Image (cartoon, rainbow, N blue to C red):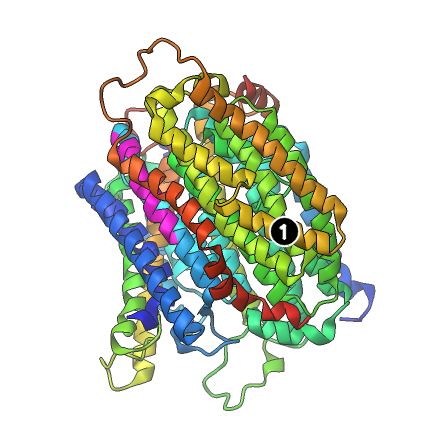
Amino acid sequence: MKQPFGSAVLEAAARLLAPFVLLFAAYVVSHGHSSPGGGFQGGVLFAAGLLLVKLTRGDPSQWEIGPRAALVLACSGVLLFAGIGLLPLAWGGSYLDYDAPPLFADPVAERVLGTVGIEVGVALAVAGIILLVFDALAGWGEPERSA
Amino acid sequence: MTAYAPVLIVVVPLTAAALVPLAALVSGRLARAVALLAITAAAAAALAALVAVLEHGAMRHRFGGWPPPWGIEYVVDPLSGLMALLVAGFGVLVAVYAGPAVATAPRLLNGAFHAMYLLLLSGLLGMVLTGDLFNLYVFLEISSLAVYALIALGSERATIASFRYLLLGTVAGSFYLLGVGYLYALTGTLNMADLTVRLAPLAGSPGVTVGVALIVVGLAIKMALFPLHGWLPDAYAFAPTPVTGLIAAVMTKVSAYVLFRVLFFVLHPAATTPDALALLGWAAAAATVAGSVMALAQADVKRMLAYSSVGQMGCIVMGFALGTPLAVTGALLHILNHAVMKGCLFLAAGGVQFRTGAARVPEYDGAASRAPLSVAAFTIAACSLVGLPPTAGFFSKWYLLVASVEQGMWPFTLALVASSLLSAVYLFRVVQRAYFGRAPQETGRARAGAAELPLAMLVPVALLAAAVVVLGLLNQAVVTQVIASALPALEAR
Amino acid sequence: MTGTWVAWLHYWLTGGLLLVGLYGMLAAPHLVRKLMGMNIMQTSIIIFFLGLAAKTDATLPIVPTDDPAPAAAAYINPLPHALMLTAIVVGVSTSGVALALILRIHRHFGTLDERDLLSKLRE
């Protein structure tokens, strides 16, 4: 299924929608610590925005995030999460105990920063994984194999 | 650093699982080095934690600094420390053993194998250490998802076996989750220690009964308790040998350990626990006999060992069902012993297959002359599984036998004896063929001239065979140092 | 919870949904249908948990900054929602793995009917 679903209507709609989907993804991620939303939802939206373009424009779209890049995205998201989690251990805190490192005087600021960092990590990981799942299932990631 | 061991044991392999695919983009060898390093670090942390716990008592780690019951806590006590060491130690041995297999199969080298392997280990370690019922569900699913992928790395048939396991495993996870939901609805807590306190006044309520039943059924599927073992033989038989070695040794054992934890620590005030245990006991007695009989009927060695696992899981659950300190001691000791001996059997059988290509019982004719060390390890582990002194298996079976006689549960005694005799038949026919069968003419598949096995495969097999004997000789120390600490909760019942 | 039967309606519907999913997994011979049954079963458990969170006369658990002493009874319980977000993630991952396996099975065996596949597994 390498053929895009593109028609004039779909392409025009996708062009209009995709930037807003991505922007909304960023909004959902950045508000996750104080209102409904968060890394998983934002990451799924981000991946959905990219997949919308992929589906309408076909494989070599300009916004292509290939399987390799998606893998790097997913792994670095997990590493960001784990890194933020492990950081407090160096200052005698617990795993994910955001206000243990004495980086800021205000513990509330530290907690907010830690939570947002975690959310960004989750969002990257989820977006990468969703893109990878799509590539694996659509067979677009492996050009040699005949579907 | 030891103070952080409870969290590092789980987080290090989990983090490394994300690092391995990145390292694999550079080179496969780098990915393998990262994986080995992480598993070894986890095993070292588990060892350090166990030593510290035996000296100073249980260690706890609160995630995010939140005190339980609001936050998630990880608990290392002597028993969970021993289980963590068992899982991580097996992780190291099997990862080393997998070296030659990985080197000959390029598709295993692209990082997927090692990433999944690390995820499986961190899932199992998390299940062992967590003190939170929902967190346990998450780790259960992490380990399950990783193992579906690992099984599917085998032959094409393994994909079908893996899919069937995926369906059953998801049913198991869902039942467990639903059971946790009932307990949460009744008590408003997910922390194991807190739940014990809050369940006490609710003893006998129908909600608790449903919750306990769902959790027990879910875990029974994961530990392949007869008659819920349908996924196990195909999954074990078609998975790559190193994967089979690891999951046969530790995966069902971790579920058995969780069942012990949940039934005896979390739910013991609930009046339904004895009923659940009585039912489990009869299922287990049937499992012991049925598993052994099915094993007898198999011609494929891996499949035979898989059915044997079904039978041996029955022995473990039977010990839980008897419920006396003696029986539970035997069951917990059998978890440890069976992990070591079944791991040894699978890895040794893999070694014989690597050397001679023999996968079925008739093909073992004369294997001892071509793969003497693997067959010797197989024989030692087989003696232990049958229950010959002074190997490890004798002692755990002895505890179970004495306990069943003391309780006057003659059907259980008979089932134990029958399973031992049957396992002697199905294992020693392999050993007999290997030593006394006439070797066929040297076939093209045999790698003549070279050493029996690559060192990376030989050392884990030899270490496990040695461990079977050493555990047998040191069983008293394991019981008094580790298992005895888990028993006071029983006597309070 | 001891209200009229209406108060228990969601409970019975959830149970029914669980059984529908299980039946699909057991009875359907096609692997994709089995997977759909599995997803229905998981969804029923998610709805069960969300039902636990519900309270009458309560609102979304977003505590406004101008509420100095928030009363727990005024907000629905957010914990089951958080738990089920995790369960949804697990469901997505399981479906992803299952679909990948189904693709591989179909590429190699050319069928997704369980009876055919089992006979090929045994030969």
**Which residue is at the front of the view, B303 or C2?**
B303
Residue in the image at 33% along x and 45% along y: B93
Q: Callout 1: residue from which chain?
A: B
| Whole-percent x, y for residue B423 in the image | 58, 33
**Which residue is at the front of the view, A73 or B446?**
B446
Q: Which residue is mark 1?
A: B400
Task: Tell me, yes or no, whether the highlighted magenta stretch contains residue C35.
Answer: no
Q: Is residue B473 visible?
A: yes
Quarter in which the N terminus of chain B is drawn: bottom left
Query: How many neighbours does mark 1 have within 10 angstroms: few (below 14), some (14-19), or many (20 or more)?
Result: many
Residue furthest left as drawn = B26
Q: Magenta stretch: dominant SS?
A: helix
- The answer to which image quadrant residue C122 occupies is top right
Residue in the image at 38% along x and 44% along y: B466
Residue in the image at 62% along x and 59% along y: B326
Residue range in magenta is B88-103
Q: Is residue B153 visible?
A: no
Residue furthest right as drawn = C4
